[in-house]
Image (cartoon, rainbow, N blue to C red):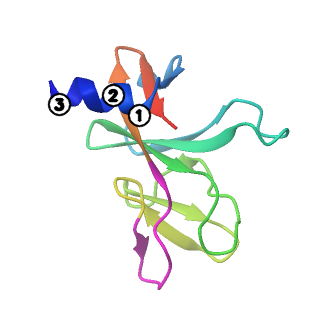
């Protein structure tokens, strides 16, 4: 009951078709809405331990872009601007003093995924 109420309060999630096919230890860049017009968001969708996780593609350090592709040690995404790494499961910076990358709730639905922005 509380879970359903929480979903109603957070709003409707964005559906990402085909995201459920993302391979273990990989990250994929996703755009939701119109990023160029400033009405969208660019995400990094990652699969770690069989689950999907979503992070903001913008690095919290200096606004660089976190890259997609294979995860470092099957867990960490990286911003190539200063080689900062972030845990894909919770957004925390690894071995540096930096804010955590923003994370979003993701729920897998078969071959698709819902992300609450």
Which residue is label 1 attached to?
10
Range drawn in magenta: 92-103
Q: Closer to the camera, 79 or 15?
A: 15
Predominant SS along the magenta part: loop
Q: Quadrant of residue 25?
A: top left
Marks 3 and 1, the one that precedes in the sequence = 3
Q: Residue 99 lies in magenta, yes or no?
A: yes
The reply to whether the C-beta atoms of the residues labelled 3 and 1 are less than 8 Å apart is no
Q: What element does badge 3 sit on?
A: helix
Q: Residue furthest bottom?
A: 97
Q: Residue at x 30, y 37 (%)?
A: 51
Q: Residue at x 61, y 52 (%)?
A: 57
- In the rendered view, tell whether residue 101 sits above or below residue 8: below
Q: Horizontally, is 25 left or right of 2 in the view?
A: right
Per the model, the C-alpha gap separating discs 3 and 1 is: 12 Å
Residue 84, position as x, y percentages in the image: 55, 73
Q: Residue 2 shows which numbered tag? A: 3
């Amino acid at each position: 009951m509380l879970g359903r109420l929480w979903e109603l309060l957070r709003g409707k999630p964005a559906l990402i078709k085909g995201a459920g096919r993302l391979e273990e230890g990989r990250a994929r860049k996703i755009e939701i809405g119109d990023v160029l017009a400033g009405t969208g968001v660019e995400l990094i969708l990652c699969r770690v331990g069989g689950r999907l996780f979503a992070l903001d593609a913008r690095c919290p350090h200096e606004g660089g872009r976190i890259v997609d592709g294979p995860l470092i040690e099957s867990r960490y995404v990286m911003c190539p601007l200063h080689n900062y790494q972030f845990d894909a499961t919770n957004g925390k910076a690894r071995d540096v003093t930096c804010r955590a990358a923003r994370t979003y709730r993701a729920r897998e639905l078969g071959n698709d995924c819902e992300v609450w922005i």
